[in-house]
Structure formats: C-alpha cells, structure tokens
Amino acid sequence: MKWLRFSPLLLLVSALGAMAQVGVYGEFSTAEINRPNTSWLYGPTLGAYYDPWHVPFLGAGIDLRAAFLGTGSTTLDSGLAGPRLVFIPHVLPFQPYAEALIGVGHTQFGQGVAKQTDTDFEYQFLGGLDMTILPRIDWRVVEFSYGGVSGLGSNLNPKMGSSLNPKTISTGLVVRLP
C-alpha cells in the first residue's frame, strides 16, 4: 500500500510528459539594419520548437530557427537556437511567447571593392503571439525581435527610432505535431 502514496506523483509526471509540444513553422520576415545605403531586407524564417516542460498556464522548451533575409548585395542569414517560454491561457486561442536565441549570422553588404562579408556571433531577443485557427494549425500573428550580429568592425544593430521599433517583424504559420 506504500506505492499508493506515490501514484498521484507518478500520474502528474506522466501527464506533464504527455503534454510535450512540437511545432514547425514558416514565417515571412522583414528586417531593418543600420548600414549605409541599405533598405529593408525580406525573406523566409523556418524553424521548429519543442516544449517538453509544462505547468498550469506555462510551457518551456527550445527553439531552432534559420532566416534567409535579403537578396543581391545585401543579405543577413542566421542560424539560432535558445530557450522558449510560452503562456498558455487554455480558454483563449492565443499563446504569447518569448525567446532568447544565440547562434551564427552571415552578413553581406556592398558591391565590388566595397563588398563586406562576415560570419559571426548573433543574438536575438524576441516575443510573439500565436493564434489557433485550426486544431493543429496556428497563425503566428506577429513576432518582434531585437538583436545584433558582431563583426564588420562593429555591431550591426537595428535602427531604433524609438524603443518600440523592433529589428525584425515576422508573420507566418505554425503546424503543431501530435
């Protein structure tokens, strides 16, 4: 009968493990960087997240993503990973989340002899809002990120007209896997 004292704990642990969530996503992203003679960069962001830890109204996990922004002489390509925290209200179809990511960024600016290219450390702090539109499909309504890429003699940081202007703005779809 001693094992009965532990059965609620085992039930809770198994229920928490069963709530692990995997999602894959594709976004359309646009970024503004503070380099001379550069315009907004556009392109896809692709990734996946895994949220194995859950408590009521909160989930945690990791996110892996790659972004391919820009074309021609100005590009910013990224490979990032890091922790993810998501608020799960259960009664509303919205899930706000926040992430802190690190990885590698490849930048290219200019043409001819003025061309600069570098691959270096990149970081991003981001937050977003997913909305369930079908049982396993979410619309990533909006995602904002602020970050930087070291290298090219200084940090490449966003133009900050005010503290509310993010580096990157994205929207897309998330498919949650069973």
Image: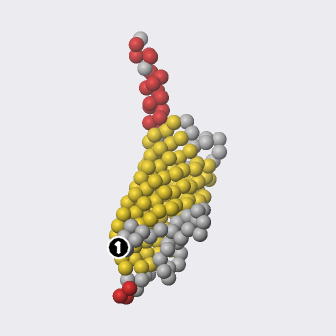
**Given the image, on which type of amino acid does mark 1 rest?**
Asp
Q: Residue 113, position in %: x, y? A: 35, 88
Asked which quadrant contains residue 148, the reply is: bottom left
Q: Residue 103, position in %: x, y? A: 38, 60
Give the residue displayed 53% in from the left and 70% down from the top: 159
Residue 28 visible in the current orientation? no
Determine the secondary structure under disc 1.
Answer: strand
Image position of 76 (left or right of 39): left
Instruction: Count up the numbered dots.
Output: 1
Q: Residue 176, position in %: x, y? A: 51, 50
Give the residue displayed 53% in from the left and 46% down from the top: 86
Residue closest to the far right = 92
Asked which quadrant contains residue 143, the reply is: bottom right
Give the residue displayed 37% in from the left and 74% down from the top: 152
Q: Check the picture and name the quadrant holding the N terminus.
A: top left
Which residue is labeled 1 in the image?
118
Give the residue displayed 44% in from the left and 49% down from the top: 83
